[in-house]
């Protein structure tokens, strides 16, 4: 499903905030295990640098274990709360 204009706006606003002050983002990643950090960093680089990232993030997540996905999802929820990213449906 394609993102709505509101979701695109929320994402762009959150991306700008993360770029302006990445301290919360970095602190959230630091809470993850080293294996989860590796993937969270890869996803973050995509979020900050690509316009259409859903396919790339799906490719990163596909081979991950349920435990790592759970960590990545918890990290994303922290970012949703902090930066107002659109929630995953």
Image (cartoon, rainbow, N blue to C red):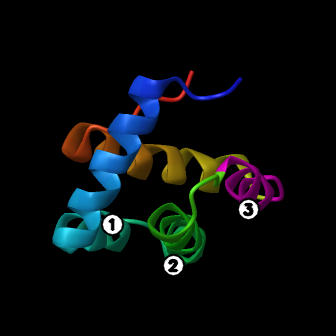
Q: Residue 45, labelled with which disc? A: none
Question: Given this view, does label 3 or label 2 mark the residue nearer the observer?
Answer: 3
Of the image marks 3 and 2, the number of the one nearer the N terminus: 2
User: Label 2: which residue?
Assistant: 34
User: Label 3: which residue?
Assistant: 60
Q: Residue 31, labelled with which disc? A: 1
Distance between mark 3 and mark 1 Cα atoms: 20 Å
Q: Position of residue 76 (x, y in %)?
A: 42, 47
Quadrant of the snapshot with the N terminus: top right
Q: Residue 42: say if magenta.
A: no
Question: Given this view, does label 3 or label 1 mark the residue nearer the observer?
Answer: 3
Span shown in magenta? 54-63
At 81% from the left and 52% from the top, the residue drawn is: 62
Q: Position of residue 29 (x, y in %)?
A: 37, 68
Distance between mark 3 and mark 2 Cα atoms: 16 Å
The quarter holding residue 57 reads bottom right
State left or right for residue 12 relative to residue 55.
left
Q: Main secondary structure of the magenta part?
A: helix
Of the image marks 3 and 1, the number of the one nearer the N terminus: 1
At 45% from the left and 36% from the top, the residue drawn is: 8
Q: Is residue 35 above or below residue 13?
A: below
Q: Is residue 13 above or below residue 89?
A: below
At 73% from the left and 62% from the top, the residue drawn is: 60
């Amino acid at each position: 499903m394609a993102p709505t204009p509101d979701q695109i706006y929320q994402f762009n606003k959150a991306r700008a905030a993360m770029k302006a002050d990445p301290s919360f983002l970095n602190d959230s990643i630091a809470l993850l295990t080293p294996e989860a950090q590796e993937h969270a960093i890869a996803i973050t680089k995509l979020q900050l640098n690509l316009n259409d990232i859903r396919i790339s993030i799906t490719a990163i997540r596909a081979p991950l274990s349920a435990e790592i996905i759970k960590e990545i999802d918890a990290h994303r929820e922290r970012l949703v709360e902090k930066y107002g990213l659109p929630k995953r449906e």
